[in-house]
Image (cartoon, grey):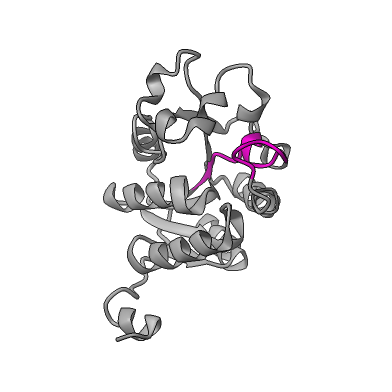
Amino acid sequence: MNDRDDNYSGVFDGVVGFGTRPAVLVIDFIKAYTTPGAPLYAADVQPAAEATAPLLEEARRTGVPVIYTRVLYHPTLLDGGLFVRKVPALQALVPGEPLADIVEAVTPKAGDVVLVKNYASAFFGTSLAATLTTLGIDTLILTGCSTSGCVRATAVDGLQHGYRVVVPRECVADRHPDPHEANLFDINAKYGDVMSLTDVLAQVRNAAA
């Protein structure tokens, strides 16, 4: 039982699969993660955002909803609770701060929904679940950052809210490869399906057809 794959085989290797009505969720692709020198900067986030752009283009072309989240706090930071104490770098994410803006590679388009969140999960304290229910969504495609933080938290809550969770591996990123790969492994084992971007694009086209 010391081998990782043998340990998980037959226990944590199920497949959720795609449903018929997917939506793409773009989680916190903001400049705080792509600006060198910023406390939250992570070099792999910009490539992940660029890899996400074709997925968003295909989603819009086929009528698949695109929903964004960004982290933004009141200038007093009172809505950040203990999270902004635990992670002081979050205190910069207030109105008027360019680091809180969504990166140009995945700029929202007319018709896209942009939700503001204060904590890791895109479901916590937001209207995401109600929006997805209204749209009849059954499959949630997660992109964004970070893999070990907001992506993982949203994957867990997505499953718990009854959605099929899919993560295109090229479209998420973290500060370091180790937590990135560990959390992709764990998401795939317990909460959703980690797939290649090529396969996700094909599934989006199939759902539209």
Tell me if residue 31 is in the magenta stretch.
Answer: yes
Magenta residues (range): 24-41
Say whether residue 110 is visible: no
Write the residue at 52% across / 60% down.
180
- Residue 75 horizontal/vertical position (percent): 50, 14
> Above or below — where is 64 with respect to 79?
below
Tell me if residue 47 is in the magenta stretch.
Answer: no
Which quarter of the rendering shows the C terminus?
A: bottom right
Numbered marks: total = 0
Residue placed most toward the observer, 155 or 182: 182
Q: Residue 82: which quarter of the image?
A: top left
Write the residue at 71% across / 38% down.
37
> Above or below — where is 159 with respect to 127?
below
> Above or below — where is 30 with respect to 8?
above
- Residue 113 horizontal/vertical position (percent): 52, 31
Write the residue at 63% across / 35% down.
32
Say whether residue 13 is visible: yes
- Residue 42 horizontal/vertical position (percent): 63, 48
- Residue 153 horizontal/vertical position (percent): 38, 48
* Left or right of 45, for residue 75: left
In terms of secondary structure, what is the magenta stretch mainly? loop
Which quarter of the rendering shows the N terminus?
A: bottom left
* Left or right of 181, for residue 82: left
Residue placed most toward the observer, 88 or 169: 88
Residue placed most toward the observer, 110 or 107: 107
Write the residue at 47% across / 63% down.
184
Q: Residue 13: which quarter of the image?
A: bottom left
Residue placed most toward the observer, 70 or 61: 70
* Left or right of 105, for residue 82: left
